[in-house]
Image (cartoon, grey):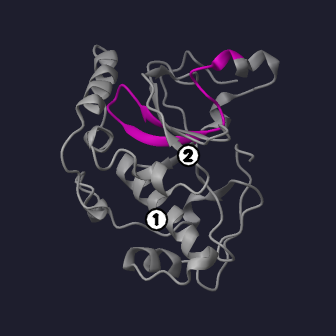
Amino acid sequence: MTDLTSDRPVSFVDGWCATDLGDHRPCRGTYEWYPYESLPPLAADRFDGGFGWLGGLGPADPERVALLDGVSAALAGTGMQLPADFTAFHTSARCHGALDEVSVTACWTDVSGPLPSPVEPGARLVRFLRDQQDCVLWYLYLRPSGESFVVASPLDFEDLPEWDEADGAADLSAAIARCAPTFEEFAYRFWVENRLWFAVHGEGPPSEPALAEYLAHYTGTAEAASPGPVAG
């Protein structure tokens, strides 16, 4: 069982939940967990919070600004705040639906208020993306220390009674995987992989440099899948 009285940060497994990339990266179901270290490395200097790879942020959407202001207000007094890249993306009129538009499994943006972490005192989760059938949900994970990163889980932490530990979920932390160090890195990898899926499933070799570079990591070497907390 997770010790909820401990002040030590919980350690999560690192993994990437996604679908196949054709023969280059097989998938046994709708989703698969892949070892994080098997993924193509991303250049950190690509991510400056401006989302240039999407053509830039453009003007903000007032309704989206109000939504994110509400999440920020709910975090007031906790010592935690939303990362700038997360807020910029989700308030951008031109960017906030970009992940929905490319998703091959009909994932959709669904920003929640701050949800208490069931495995770490004081920490919060902010859901921002979910599979259409809730096979997997993605969250921003916030710690009082100021650390934040992206996690994925098959659990909806807004409806935890359904996942009562007493009914068999022995350790909820085992059902949470750390999948990106920053929101922008998550968004980029999700955006590239989903667009690449269309390329390898009938559109032909990708001509865009970013997609071709990503696929080159797998060319000739199909990565083996790894068991993880999500089945789909």
In magenta segment, residue 147: yes
Magenta range is 139-161
Q: Is residue 41 above or below residue 181?
A: below
Q: Exactly how many numbered labels are in the figure? A: 2
The residue lying toward the viewer, choosing from 38 and 109, is 109
Residue occupied by mark 2: 107
Residue 78 makes an appearance in the image? no
Which secondary structure lies at badge 2?
Answer: loop
Q: Nearer the viewer, mark 2 or mark 1?
A: 2
Residue at the left extreme, as displayed? 59
Tag 1 or tag 2, which sits nearer the N-term?
Answer: 2
Residue 75 makes an appearance in the image? yes
Q: Quadrant of residue 71?
A: top left
Residue occupied by mark 1: 192
Which secondary structure lies at badge 1?
Answer: helix
How far across and down, in percent of the image, does residue 75 sit?
33, 19
How far across and down, in percent of the image, does residue 119 sit?
58, 24
Label 2, label 1: how many angstroms apart (C-alpha)? 15 Å
The residue lying toward the viewer, choosing from 170 and 82, is 82
Please tell me which residue is depicted at 58% across the width and 68% down the height of the picture: 197
Q: Is residue 196 above or below residue 194?
A: below
**Is residue 161 found left or right of 179 in the rendered image?**
right
Please tell me which residue is depicted at 50% across the width and 66% down the height of the picture: 195
Please tell me which residue is depicted at 28% across the width and 38% down the height of the picture: 91
How far across and down, in percent of the image, does residue 182 sit?
38, 48
How far across and down, in percent of the image, does residue 25 sit?
66, 71
Quarter of the figure with the N terminus:
top right
